Image (cartoon, rainbow, N blue to C red):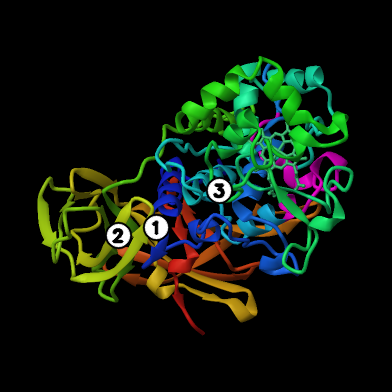
Amino acid sequence: DIPGIERQASIDELEHFLVDNGGYNSVPFASAVSPCAKYSGFAAGGSNQGEQTSAQWVRFAFHDFVTADLSAGTGGLDASLGFEGARDENKGIFVDDTMQFISQTFSALLSTADQVTLAVVLAVAGCGGNARAIPLRVGRTDATQAGPSGVPGPFTPLEPTLAQFAKAGFSATETIALVSCGHSLGRIHFSNFPDIVDNSAVSATNLNGGIGFDSTPAGLDPAGMNEYLSGTNGRGGPLVTSPNVDARSDFRLFNSDGNQTIRDLSVNFGRTCSAVFTKMLNTVPGSVSLSAPVTPQTWKVTNIIMHISNGGSVRVEGLFRYLWTTVAPPQKVTYTTISPRGTSATHRSNSVIGTGTSLFGNTTYWDFARAIDSPGTTTLSFEGATYPINDMIFILPTQSRVEPDKLLIRIKAAAATSITAGIGDMEATLYVPVSQAGSKAFKITTVKLPLKKFTVAGNYTLYEGKINVANVKNVVAKVVLGSSESQSVKTSLFKQGA
Ligand code: HEM
């Protein structure tokens, strides 16, 4: 977690990235691995590169996690791999492609490591697996430098391979399962392993010379195991059949228990792969405490913002989302605001504002805007869940602005005048994603700026300030006055324009 960012905001963001896959208010993440064979990376050859983004993401998680030392509480899923792409053991463009992709959606709300776990789940879903079978949790912290080496390769003998996985918490059986689940997707490339793949694999539409581990490299399925057991098609792929016996790492593993794990897996593939993938993603440094599983929400309130009129009337605005499969959405939805004097008022949303597609069904959105009894309204209640409202201190997105060409952010915010007595400036914190040396992943830098009083509106005092930042994309802001803090707000919700 980033200090100052509420865990609930991270949970909401992950749920959003997981569920809102197309259409209104969607995130272009799942679409990068749907269909499964798609390449959404940054190599010059594009779709002719012979690469597959879903496979890159799964391989990324493996190389990142496997250097964990469970007993020391170090390593695991922490995006340290972003700094380790130049190592021989991490050959290929998958490290930079994955980090650069995630830099596009990275913000203080969701660490790169948490987004890697999302990437694996979306890859599984895009490749025919079950997106619900791998529960996602937030809370991973990103490494700030490279970690130890130790990723086993095709030429690593069986014992040290099993020892490395054991250090990361995996039994021999789990290791065999994890490797064969992983190698159900993607390819081994001439560009990375010319000792194992012949250059005849290279063509104008396969620039890196990729050869599938099985006959369905774009399907998370037991085909490879069946081909291995029955000696058909590629017989389990180059890491089983390489003429160079030393390169047969998959064969050594699969055969190490007389093929028992592979036989079991060919029957119980989906369930077993989900279990070992889940274990891989939740292997984290000892200092990390993960959230409870984040599941798709049927009803949700999102993008809550506050507004104040010149006369001091406070309004809460936002979106309601309904995720549905069979029960079609109503024309409008109702919600309740709960005010200081214990009174509650029930309201209706506006009409449907947009619809979208999801791995989990369809999404329907309504917007709402409602004057609230303030200061003092504390809660918005919708479909059985409550959402906190802080009308004592809040950012004013409708009066704030991002000017991308000038790399400038202008913020206005309000505080109930009753809490301003004896306190001078308000302070804004901006959580700005910036590039970093050594990794294509971004990191957060926090920028603080004073906000000065500029007017009074009813029971509120208004503050303003502006500052230049290194990057204006995916910035999150909050404001503090004395001991009072606002909720965090994405500056993408600020009114745009000069
Ligand atoms: C002893 C363990 C392992 C060895 C020696 C090994 C080796 C390899 C090699 C040599 C490649 C080819 C990379 C390239 O040329 O681009 C590869 C690809 C891949 N590996 Fe592994 N691997 C192991 C375990 C795993 C595990 C545990 C997973 C996932 C859970 C995994 C997932 C993948 C995937 C998805 C690819 C395809 C990547 C792509 O198409 O870009 N591997 N592996």
Which region of the structure is painted magenta? 75-96
Examine the structure image and report whether residue 87 is included in the region drawn in magenta: yes
Tag 1's secondary structure? loop
- Identified at 30% across, 67% down, the residue is 355
- Identified at 62% across, 55% down, the residue is 53
Q: Residues within 10 Å of mark 1 (few under 14, many from 20)?
A: many
- In the rendered view, would you say 174 is above or below 62? above
Amino acid type, callout 2: Thr
Q: Residues within 10 Å of mark 2 (few under 14, many from 20)?
A: many
Q: Which residue occupies the foreground of this view, 59 or 4? A: 59
Q: Residues within 10 Å of mark 3 (few under 14, many from 20)?
A: many
Q: Quadrant of residue 45?
A: bottom right
Decide: marks 2, 1 in contact (CB < 8 A)?
Answer: yes
Relative to 389, is 420 on the left or the right? right
Q: Which residue is mark 2?
A: 363
Q: Which residue is mark 3?
A: 119
Q: Which residue occupies the foreground of this view, 451 or 382? A: 382
Amino acid type, callout 3: Ala
Decide: marks 2, 3 in contact (CB < 8 A)?
Answer: no
Instruction: Give the alpha-carbon distance from disc 3 to disc 1, as whole Å.
Output: 14 Å
Instruction: Give the alpha-carbon distance from disc 2 to disc 1, as whole Å.
Output: 7 Å
Q: Confirm if mark 3 falls within 8 A of ligand 1.
A: no
- In the rendered view, would you say 101 is above or below 244? below
